[in-house]
Image: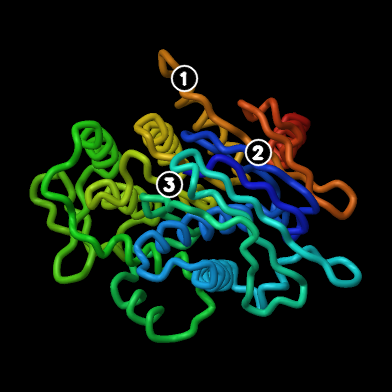
Amino acid sequence: MIKRIEISNYTVFEKASFEFLQGLNIIVGENSTGKSLILKLAYSCAATSHSMGLSKRQGKEEWQRSLADKLQEVCKPDSLGRLVSRRPGRSRCDIDFRTYKPVGSSFSFNFATNASTEVKIEKAPTDYLGSKPVFIPTKEVLSVYPGFAAILRAHQLQFDETYLDLAEAVELPVLKRLQKEEEPLKVALEKVMDGRVGMENGRFYLFPNAEGKGKIEMPLVAEGIRKIALLTYLVMNGGLRNKSMLFWDEPEVNLNPRLMRPLAAALVDMADRGIQVVLATHSLAMIKEIEIARRSKEAPSPARYFALFPIDDRIEVNQGESAEAVAPIASLEAELDLAGRYLELD
């Protein structure tokens, strides 16, 4: 699991440090403050560490090549140097990636403005992350699987590699038996869907609980339910279990407000069950639902909030244990302003 990422001259960040909990982490900020870029950086580092653990070639050059390729395919810049902060003259981006366990899987690297596809490992790792991270992008994939995955493998498209990685994650069949602590999470998610998710002949379907209702093709299911179905299937096939890492970019996109409450509760539950959850959002409703789900428990699990906000030509980061502790948050201010203007109508 990721413990800390320290960055300098990375995209919109001049200098920043993110201290992650092993449980729930929420990155909050308005558009263009770098939420997705931080999420993708963390995911790229974790995914490279896991894949290198499976590789037979684990030398420094192989590490540098694999890390550069992953950053390139996940962030999709014209060249790797485009991820360096835009400043006059030549500059360099430095990344320090720290993990909880194994400690030896930590590493640091850099790349310069003129880098095309190369990074330089400054401190090489001696170990690897055992769990394969999961990244859920803003667009869902269940309704377009499996043809979408086949196209991404064969052709160069302007979809970043998180979509292909996710499609490959759901390719795994369901486990014969879930771990004891996973069954309640699966049951809770199926209750939200009022049905169960399954695959037949390479396509995903929703099987409603209501008697007499047949299976429903996933493209005909509301997108919010498809997102719940995706989480459920990843629990069922072992993609999300204890010590896993889940990165999710704006889970509230195209989500029926009615589903925010059970989704927030499921994410809090996942964090309580040993999954490291890292979210990026600018939804006040999602933030509130997460806090309600957390604080409604007898022993609320800890959470870490990161508020990104612009100052002059850079992005600053505030960190705290609650949404209130990391103000200002643009979504909070905008919602309060909207409520005030609405009340003025009377």
- Whether residue 306 is visible here, answered yes or no, is yes
- Front residue of 94/149: it is 94
Q: Residue furthest bottom?
A: 155
- The three-letter amino acid code for the residue at tag 2 is Phe
Q: Separation of disc 2 and disc 3 at Cα?
A: 18 Å
Badge 2 density bin: few <14, some 14–19, many ≥20, Cα 10 Å: many
Residue 267: give x, y in percent of width and height. Answer: 42, 37
Image: 100 above or below 221: above
Residue 288: give x, y in percent of width and height. Answer: 56, 31
Q: Quadrant of residue 88?
A: bottom right
Q: Separation of disc 2 and disc 1 at Cα?
A: 19 Å
First in residue order: circle 2 vs circle 1:
1
Which residue sits at x=15%, y=65%? 200
| Disc number lying in front (3 or 1) | 3
First in residue order: circle 3 vs circle 1:
3
Residue annotated with mark 1: 300
Q: Separation of disc 3 and disc 1 at Cα?
A: 20 Å
Image: 294 above or below 70: above
- The three-letter amino acid code for the residue at tag 1 is Pro
Residue annotated with mark 3: 245
Q: Tag 2's secondary structure?
A: strand
- Whether residue 136 is visible here, answered yes or no, is no
Q: Residue furthest top?
A: 298
Q: Tag 1's secondary structure?
A: loop
Residue 85: give x, y in percent of width and height. Answer: 79, 63
